[in-house]
Image (cartoon, grey):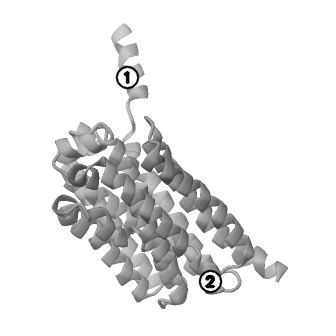
Amino acid sequence: MAARSETMEASRKAPSRLHEYYELCKPRVVMLIVFTAIVGMFLAVPGLPPWGALLWGTLGIALQASSAAAINQIIDRNIDARMARTCGRPLVTGRLTMTESIAFATILGIAGFAVLWFLCNPLAAVLTQFTLIGYAGIYTLYLKRATPQNIVIGGAAGAAPPLLGWVAITGEVHAHALILFAIIFIWTPPHFWALAIERRDEYAKVDIPMLPVTHGIEFTRTQVLLYTILLLLVTLLPWATAMSGWIYLAGSLALNAVFLYYAIRLKWWPTPGLPMKTFGYSIVYLMGIFTLLLVDHYLGALLA
């Protein structure tokens, strides 16, 4: 009886298979990707986007992003096993096998491409597929291990979601969509390098040439500050091009002031735990910027 009770208790504590597949998709990363893609969809049109394109575009991009995340874990499983931040991932612990993970990633990728091709438009499908290849293939397989500029060059794939969302609705690439791309592209280095400073020793142990490993923490702090200043300037572009109005401008300046405060402290007055606080704020910052873009798009039009 006691043995049966212990078995039931262990079963309750063990993660379900569904949960393991969910974790294989890097859900928190994918949620941020999908959020920025949805904002891109709403910004693409003056009123509300067509609900069919909105629904299927969101689903297709989410499926392809989840597939890319799963492929990333498949390729990086040996590295993940040696890092504290990633050692609990399903492939590392053995709760999912390679065969299961590859099949799952393949099904997600094919399904996402089909949804975008047949229910949105071929351009959205092709661009999203290139993004998957860029992240899961070019970045994960090559850039991540080849150069300390990996996160800068590879950031193009991570910056694509709002552009993909825009294309899913309109079927074309617009200059304003490229501005959304540029914001995330410039945001990625200070966002990730803050984390890399905190995890420098782990990256060094697994021979990943992140900037703090190859050029030192002090140099990386300088780069975080410089990119944060550049990010402030790039986030002015929606206002400068009349894409957004004063609501966005005021809010974005406030968000940038806080980000700049963190970057300055990180450069000249670093304290234990500050890199992770900077990393955490950078996520809040990006969500705030895109929320402001969305609010200004509709509320600004009403107040005009």
Q: At x 25% / y 40%, what residue is drawn?
A: 201
What residue is shown at x 59% (from left), y 67% (from top)?
Answer: 290
Where is 151 relative to 179, above or below?
above
Tag 1 residue: 10
2 or 1: tag closer to the N-terminus: 1
Q: Secondary structure at mark 1?
A: helix
Q: In this view of the protein, which residue sits in the foreground, 224 or 54?
A: 224
Horizontally, residue 28 falls left or right of residue 132, namely right
Above or below: residue 304 compared with residue 270: below
Q: Kindly identify the amino acid type of the residue bearing the numbered disc 2.
A: Ala
What kind of element bears circle 2? helix
The residue shown at (66%, 60%) is: 254
Q: Nearer the viewer, residue 303 or 278?
A: 278
> Residue 140 at x, y = what percent?
23, 61
* Percent coordinates x, y for residue 79 in the rendering: 20, 46
Which amino acid type is marked by label 1?
Ala
